Structure formats: C-alpha cells, structure tokens
Image (cartoon, rainbow, N blue to C red):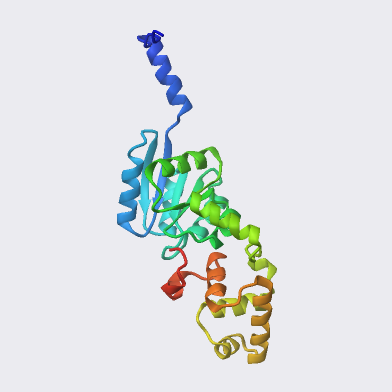
Amino acid sequence: MASAPRPSGPNSLGALAQAAASNPRIRVLLVDDHPVVRRGIRSCLAQAEHIEVVGEAADGIEGLSLAKERRPDVVLADIDMPHMNGLALTDALHRELPGTRVLILSMYTNTEYVLRIIQSGAKGYVLKNTDAPDLIQAINSAYRGDAFFSPDVARLALNQFVRGAGGTLSPTDLTHRERDVLVGIADGLSNKEIAERLGVGVRTVESHREHLMGKLNIHSVAGLTKFAVARGLVSLQGGVEAPLAVAR
C-alpha cells in the first residue's frame, strides 16, 4: 500500500501546532539533597522534549520556596531530606499550590510509605533506579492527575494490604499517649527513658507499648520505628539508625 504524502506548507504547521497542543510542555522541579541524583534525573528527563526542568532544590524548605517562585507542574521530591522531608513538602504543596502534582522518590521499595504518600496528596512513589521511560511515564501520569507507583512498590503494597498486616492504620487510630510512646521507641529510648520523658511510670509505658503492638500487629522495635517514620511521626534525620532499612 502506498504511504500517504507527508503534509507540507500550512498543513505541516497546523499538524505541528496540533501535536504541541496535545503534548503540552511539563515544567518539573527536582528536590533531592544529593546533587548526583539530581544530575542523573535531569539527564533522564532530557530525553523528553516536552519536559522542562525549571529548577533544583536540596531540601524541602528550599523546594517549597522555589515551587512558589517557579510554579512547576510536577515536583519530584526525595522521601527523606534535611529540614523538611518529602512528605511534609507534599503536605505543604497540597495546601499552598494545589495545582502542583508531587511524585515521591525513594531508593527502596518500602511499602509502609504508600498509604502515607497517598494521604499526603502525592501522585505516586517512584524508585530512583527507575529507567527513563518509566520516569517520564510517571511524570506524564502525575501531570494528568493520575497516580503512578513503580511496579515493584505497587506489587509489594498490594500483597501487604491483602495480608492485612496493619498497613491500613494511621497515627490517628492511636491514643495521644500511644503516639508519645511510639515516638520514644522510634527515638531509641528505653521504657524507663520514655517514662522520664513523659512523666509517667514505667509500667504505664509498658502497658502502652503492649497496646501499640496489639493494635498495629507489629512486634519489634524495628517494625514500630519503621511505622513511625512512614507515618511522618519522626524523621531519619533525628538519629534513627540506618540498619532499619527504611527509605531515604
């Protein structure tokens, strides 16, 4: 079959204009405290002519300020940064720039973050080792208002939710004292130290600790700490040890 003639003259200009209209330029802001990561992401996005990186920030506070100035369509934000982490930044952007979409970046497939990310108003959770086509697809999806989760994260999160491993609970399901005790555990304090911090007896702390583990179905210090970090009650910058293997 003979191919159709390629448009020329005014028709070609019209076709180009129509194509540009159907693929608007997406303005993206990168927020990550590692310059090498930002450079890598910028290099990946250079493959997409319709995506323009309008700025870079090294922490959440700088990212929020720059977002207000540059008004990006999509913000790519690291999950854990100094001064203001990615979830806190997402909360702030959701309130102050509701038209800006946020994609959270992480190095690890930490499913405990997924619910908190959705609650914060972010449009997805993207692994830093995602290849360029998937990263571009994630940005396109976020720009359209659709959610995007890296396949490994989506699969593990689905498995966790099907198992019902306490993943649907949030800090609001805990009492005020239970949250205080949870933060103390995540800070690495003993029952005695938590009791001294809260001005209560050690037995009271032990009782709250037992209730926490029962409610959350989490029976280890590492698991409770990961829950506290995932729900934004504490930050890794506050001294939680790396061996807990939560996403940074």
Identify the image quadrant of residue 215.
bottom right
Residue 73 seen from this side? no
Q: How many marks?
A: 0
Foreground of the two, 240 or 237? 240
Q: Using the rendered image of the protein, determine whether residue 57 is visible from the camera's viewpoint.
A: yes
Compared to 49, does 114 lie above or below? below
Q: Residue at x 66, y 81 (%)?
A: 210
Image quadrant holding the C terminus, namely: bottom left
Left or right of 181? Residue 13 is left
Kindly identify the residue that appears in the image at 46 percent across and 72 percent down: 244
Q: Give the percent coordinates (x, y) of residue 137.
A: 46, 40
Is 39 left or right of 30, judged from the image as shown?
A: left
In the image: residue 37, left or right of residue 60: left
Residue at the spot x=41%, y=59% of the render?
Answer: 107
- Quadrant, the N terminus: top left
Q: Residue 113, how many percent across, how many down?
A: 54, 60
Q: Nearer the viewer, residue 47 or 81?
A: 47
**Camera-side residue of 8 and 176:** 8
| Residue at 54 percent of width and 53 percent of height | 155
Q: Horizontal placement of 41 versus 65: left or right?
A: left
Where is residue 77, by image quadrant? bottom left
- Picture coordinates of residue 19, whole percent (x, y): 44, 23
Residue 116: percent from left, percent from top: 58, 59
- Compared to residue 18, the image places residue 248 above or below, namely below
